[in-house]
Image (cartoon, rainbow, N blue to C red):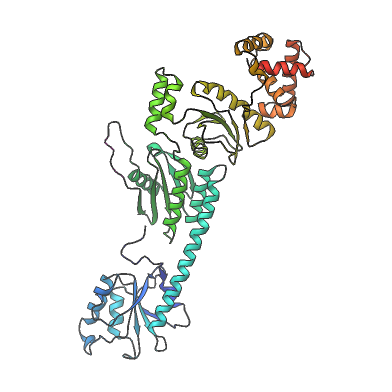
């Protein structure tokens, strides 16, 4: 966070000003720390400039205010001490036209009070020094804006990758040259990237995260918490940002130094992570909790659906193109689809999406979507989404939707269709792998390779299972009429 004691302008290293050959400035007293910075230049001939300083200035004076007998008293000590008390960063003394040299007593006072003293030669005007300061400041501002812009672009690109949360943390850690941590409930590390921290700094980072998102015990009264907090421990700059109000995620950042723009960059990352881990839904967490309790206590799905924000729903099954999904990746997928009703089931994420939010292909995911179903048909929608996902994986299609077109099956009463399916498929239902393999094989037009991909088995296994089905059913699976009848039965089993 910016220091309120100095103006909100980019700091300019004093060393950069001294390096300007056109100014010919020379430091003759005080510390030569390269970290000394100035925030602007100010000219004053007041004997006591304290009331007119904001802090961080290079104070320029020609010594007009200095009395003739100043060297024998405490004048220079008083003068320098007041500049230091006001927060002045350095003192520039012009040796013309009033003085031929810098008074020795002033040099001694600057040494004593550790205030950098710069000699301004006769050919260099104070306006030239001030202009140089503003030029360096403009260059620093330009560099800061460019750094922030590049960081924003890289963070946005990271947020669109297959593993958005770890990618954003990696980019943030690289941009600040430190470590970025995402804490979940109970201060547990959900994801982390960047340099390792010492035990003391790690503990301090956890404690800082607790300030913006305190863990509340049973029966505890919630207390307001700040949205962000900063600290410095063992020379490491720490910052923590609360993400959202219900998910209880916290972004924490540790950097070895505090550069201009770091706070802006971290804030951009916090906004992106809030979107990736946040809850995008029409109902509240309390309403979802109420719906869950009612289901567990025996309420019908259609009775609790209004609490979740929709009358018709689409079930989406999604499989990541890379590693198995975790809770954060699943939450990010749900946010992208517009729903917080997310379940991780092995390597598949299931999302219940209101039907008015049309599922779209998601980068890094292969998805299958059901038709729009009512709450009492959620189980049917789940099966439709599973079959759609299997077809999407087999055909390497980002998103496959279950077809809602009415077909010949609608001409046959459901009860009769189910009875026919049970009778026809009875010989192969003792082994659940057989009807599933046959269904997938038929849906993919008899492709051995694509069926193997969809079922995650070897193509020879598919051949063996299909041959077994043909033998048990006593049917020629190369006959189109047989395939049509079996497909009808498999859809109604």
Residue 276, relative to residue 74: is it above or below? above
- Determine whether, in the image, residue 479 is placed left or right of residue 262: right
Looking at the picture, how far across and down is residue 232, in whole percent? 36, 55
Residue 94, relative to residue 366: is it above or below? below
Q: Which portion, as a residue range, is magenta?
A: 220-225
In magenta stretch: residue 224: yes
Image quadrant in which you'd find residue 469: top right
Q: Is residue 491 visible?
A: no
Looking at the picture, how far across and down is residue 44, in whole percent? 29, 80
In magenta stretch: residue 354: no
Which residue is pictured at 68% across the width and 19% down the height?
Answer: 408
Which residue is pictured at 59% across the width and 42% down the height?
Answer: 363
Image quarter where the N terminus lies is bottom left
- Which of these two is toward me, 340 or 61? 340
- Determine whether, in the image, residue 454 is placed left or right of residue 44: right
- Determine whether, in the image, residue 149 is placed left or right of residue 486: left
């Amino acid at each position: 966070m910016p220091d309120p004691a100095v103006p909100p302008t980019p700091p300019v290293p004093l060393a950069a000003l001294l390096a300007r050959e056109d100014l010919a400035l020379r430091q003759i007293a005080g510390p030569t720390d390269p970290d000394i910075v100035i925030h602007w230049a100010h000219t004053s001939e007041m004997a006591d400039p304290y009331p007119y300083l904001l802090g961080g200035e290079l104070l320029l004076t020609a010594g007009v205010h200095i009395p003739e007998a100043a060297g024998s008293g405490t004048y220079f000590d008083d003068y320098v001490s007041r500049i230091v008390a006001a927060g002045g960063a350095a003192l520039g003394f012009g040796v013309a036209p009033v003085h031929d040299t810098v008074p020795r007593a002033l040099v001694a006072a600057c040494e004593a009070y550790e205030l950098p003293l710069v000699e301004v030669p006769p050919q260099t005007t104070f306006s030239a020094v001030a202009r140089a300061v503003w030029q360096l400041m403009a260059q620093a501002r330009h560099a800061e804006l460019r750094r922030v812009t590049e960081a924003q672009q890289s963070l946005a690109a990271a947020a669109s990758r297959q593993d958005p949360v770890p990618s954003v943390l990696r980019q943030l850690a690289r941009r600040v040259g430190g470590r970025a941590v995402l804490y979940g409930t109970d201060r547990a590390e959900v994801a982390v990237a960047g340099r390792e921290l010492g035990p003391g700094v790690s503990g301090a980072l956890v404690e800082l995260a607790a300030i913006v998102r305190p863990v509340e015990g049973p029966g505890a009264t919630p207390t307001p918490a700040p949205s962000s907090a900063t600290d410095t421990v063992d020379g490491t700059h720490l910052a923590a940002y609360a993400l959202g109000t219900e998910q209880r995620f916290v972004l924490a950042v540790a950097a070895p130094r505090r550069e201009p723009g770091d706070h802006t960059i971290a804030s951009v990352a916090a906004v992106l992570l809030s979107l990736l881990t946040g809850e995008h839904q029409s109902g509240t967490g309390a309403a979802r909790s109420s719906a869950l309790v009612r289901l567990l206590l025996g309420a019908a799905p259609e009775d609790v659906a209004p609490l979740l924000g929709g009358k018709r729903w689409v079930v989406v099954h999604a499989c990541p193109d890379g590693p198995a999904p975790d809770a954060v990746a699943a939450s990010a997928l749900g946010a992208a689809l517009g729903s917080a009703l997310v379940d991780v089931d092995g390597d598949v994420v299931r999302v219940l999406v209101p039907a008015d939010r049309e599922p779209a292909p998601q980068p890094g995911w292969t998805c299958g979507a059901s038709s729009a179903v009512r709450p009492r048909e959620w189980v049917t929608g789940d099966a439709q989404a599973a079959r759609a996902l299997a077809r999407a994986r087999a055909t390497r299609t980002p998103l496959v939707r279950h077809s809602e077109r009415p077909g010949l099956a609608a001409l046959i009463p459901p009860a009769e269709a189910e009875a026919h399916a049970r009778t026809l498929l009875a010989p192969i239902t003792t082994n659940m792998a057989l009807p599933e393999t046959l269904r997938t094989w038929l849906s993919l037009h008899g492709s051995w390779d694509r069926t193997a991909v969809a079922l995650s088995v070897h193509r020879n296994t598919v051949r063996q299972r299909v041959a077994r089905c043909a033998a048990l059913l006593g049917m020629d699976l190369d006959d189109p009429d047989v395939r049509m009848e079996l497909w009808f039965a498999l859809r109604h089993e």
